[in-house]
Amino acid sequence: ENSPTKMESVNRVAQLPIVESTVNMCCNIYDKVKDSSPLVNSVLASAEGKVKQAAESAQPLAAKLEGPIKKVDSLLCTSLDFVEEKVPCIKLPPGEMYENTKNAISSTVEPAINAASAMAAQGAQKVATLAANYAQSNVNDHKNKGE
């Protein structure tokens, strides 16, 4: 039996923390669904068997395409190297990636919100001052007319 063609790029992507975490979560959900009832278990086990058969049936074709597959794999690995170099956070665990993103957004957005709030407060104070001056002017006008 021929061993299936291994793609380093697929293994590398699968080892990225965000991908690995997502796959593990999906596997846990799949296992829970599969264990939810004997009927579901039977249907999914049958489907798994069919997928395995299809993969085994495709193996001779994959063996014939091994050269082009290796070229594509090499290109994908080069592309992944580039992404990992330009976006190093892709190697971080999901929780850390989330916190870093949240902090970056907060540090960018918070100053703008503070500036807008300060301008709004200043505008509100100006309106209040103008309204008070207008009211005082009207009171003075009425006093002067009454004298």
Image: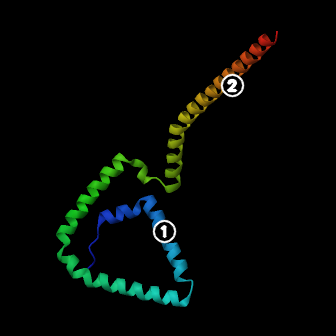
Q: Quadrant of residue 54?
A: bottom left
Decide: few, some or many residues near mark 1? Use Cα within 10 Å; few <14, some 14-19, many ≥20. few
The answer to whether the residues at label 1 and label 2 have Cβ atoms under 8 Å apart is no
Q: Secondary structure at mark 1?
A: helix
Q: Check disc 2 and give the amino acid type.
A: Ala
Judging by the rendered image, the residue that carries numbered circle 1 is 24
Q: Residue at x 29, y 84 (%)?
A: 56
Residue 24: x and y, percent? Answer: 48, 68
Q: Nearer the viewer, residue 138 or 131?
A: 138
Residue 1 in sight: no
Residue 103: x and y, percent? Answer: 53, 43
| Residue 73: mark | none
Q: Residue at x 60, y 30 (%)?
A: 120
Query: Marks 1 and 2, Cα distance to the nearest angstrom?
Result: 59 Å
Residue 43 in sight: yes
Image quadrant where one finds the C terminus? top right
Q: Residue at x 35, y 65 (%)?
A: 11
Q: Check disc 1 and give the amino acid type.
A: Asn
Q: Earlier in the sequence, mark 1 or mark 2?
A: 1
Query: Is residue 45 shown above or below 86?
Result: below
Left or right of residue 97: residue 121: right
Q: Nearer the viewer, residue 39 or 117?
A: 117
Q: Secondary structure at mark 2?
A: helix
Left or right of residue 110: residue 59: left
Judging by the rendered image, the residue that carries numbered circle 2 is 128
Image quadrant where one finds the N terminus? bottom left
Query: Is residue 115 shown above or below 86?
Result: above
Q: Residue at x 53, y 46 (%)?
A: 102
